[in-house]
């Protein structure tokens, strides 16, 4: 399958994002079996886990190499580097390199509230961390999908800064920039307006990662795709269609 022929590429996050759901605990064999099924479905990317967070995910990235996948690329998830630690010594970034994936999904803060009150760093420092992280991984031959965490909340509070986050990722040559509705509280008409605004200011391929806390993940994803978004991270827990 030629991924370039697809109008929309799917990044399935069930093995990482979905695994955080209450009551869900995947064994290594579970994750490998799900990987094979997702490959059969033809999804573009499978987010296998966060190798810097737990030993099970490290084992998964070792074991998944034995699978002969025909349609999907397994990718690793991680965060931006820590302030004050050189990229080459950051354990999170090194765990991604050790996983031997070709693409990394990196999340970074797009909401000023989380920059100043969670990371407790300056707004400029946050931009520097985003750029340095993506640039480091790119220098080691990896493609990077940048997930702008809490983007819609951040945009509603400070659109100029939220856009600076996207432009920084773009300047660092992220392959895809994902607009994340991490709290799942953005209404569909807001997603419509914000995505159209962003598309006029960012040249990179855009993605939409809609959480379903308000029951709007499907609607928000569809309106973003209608507006030209080409990359859609989904998981079973976040985008579940009703059954009859």
Image (cartoon, helix red, strand yellow):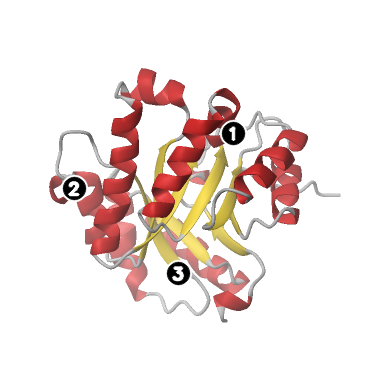
Which badge, 1 or 3, comes first in the chain's sequence?
Answer: 3
Q: Is mark 1 on a helix, strand or loop?
A: helix
Q: Mark 3 points at which residue?
A: 73
Quarter of the rendering occupied by the N terminus: bottom right
- Badge 3: residue crowd in 10 Å (few <14, some 14–19, many ≥20): some
Residue 22: percent from left, percent from top: 52, 33
CB under 8 Å between discs 1 and 3:
no
Q: Name the residue under label 1.
A: 152
Mark 1 and mark 2: Cα distance apart in space: 28 Å
Q: Is mark 3 on a helix, strand or loop?
A: strand
Compared to residue 26, the image places residue 214 above or below, namely above
Where, by quadrant of the figure, is residue 99 drawn?
bottom left
CB under 8 Å between discs 1 and 2:
no
- Badge 2: residue crowd in 10 Å (few <14, some 14–19, many ≥20): many
**Residue pictured at 45% horizontal, 61% vertical:** 175
Residue 64: percent from left, percent from top: 36, 67
Mark 1 and mark 3: Cα distance apart in space: 28 Å
Q: Which of 26 and 182 is in front in this view?
A: 182
Where, by quadrant of the figure, is residue 113 drawn?
top left
Residue 110: percent from left, percent from top: 46, 34
Q: Mark 2 points at which residue?
A: 87
- Badge 1: residue crowd in 10 Å (few <14, some 14–19, many ≥20): many
In this image, 173 relative to 151: left or right? Answer: left
Where, by quadrant of the figure, is residue 140 drawn?
bottom left
């Amino acid at each position: 399958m030629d991924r370039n022929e697809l109008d929309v590429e799917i990044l399935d996050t069930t093995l990482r994002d979905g695994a955080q759901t209450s009551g869900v605990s995947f064994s290594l064999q579970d994750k490998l079996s799900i990987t094979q099924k997702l490959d059969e479905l033809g999804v573009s990317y499978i987010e296998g886990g966060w190798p810097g967070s737990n030993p099970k995910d490290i084992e998964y990235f070792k074991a998944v190499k034995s699978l002969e996948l025909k349609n999907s690329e397994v990718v690793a998830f991680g965060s931006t580097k820590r302030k004050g630690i050189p990229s080459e010594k950051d354990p999170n970034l090194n765990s991604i390199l050790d996983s031997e994936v070709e693409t990394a999904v990196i999340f970074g803060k797009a909401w000023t509230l989380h920059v100043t009150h969670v990371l407790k760093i300056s707004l400029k420092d946050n931009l520097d961390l985003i750029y340095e992280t993506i640039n480091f991984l790119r220098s080691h031959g990896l493609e990077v999908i940048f997930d702008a965490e809490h983007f819609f909340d951040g945009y509603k509070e400070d659109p100029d800064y939220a856009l600076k986050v996207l432009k920084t990722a773009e300047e660092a040559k992220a392959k895809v920039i994902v607009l994340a509705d991490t709290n799942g509280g953005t209404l569909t008409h807001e997603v419509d307006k914000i995505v159209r605004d962003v598309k006029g200011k960012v040249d990179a391929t855009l993605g939409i990662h809609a959480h379903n806390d308000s029951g709007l993940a499907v609607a928000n994803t569809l309106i973003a795709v209608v507006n030209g978004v080409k990359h859609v991270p989904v998981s079973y827990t976040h985008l579940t269609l009703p059954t009859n």
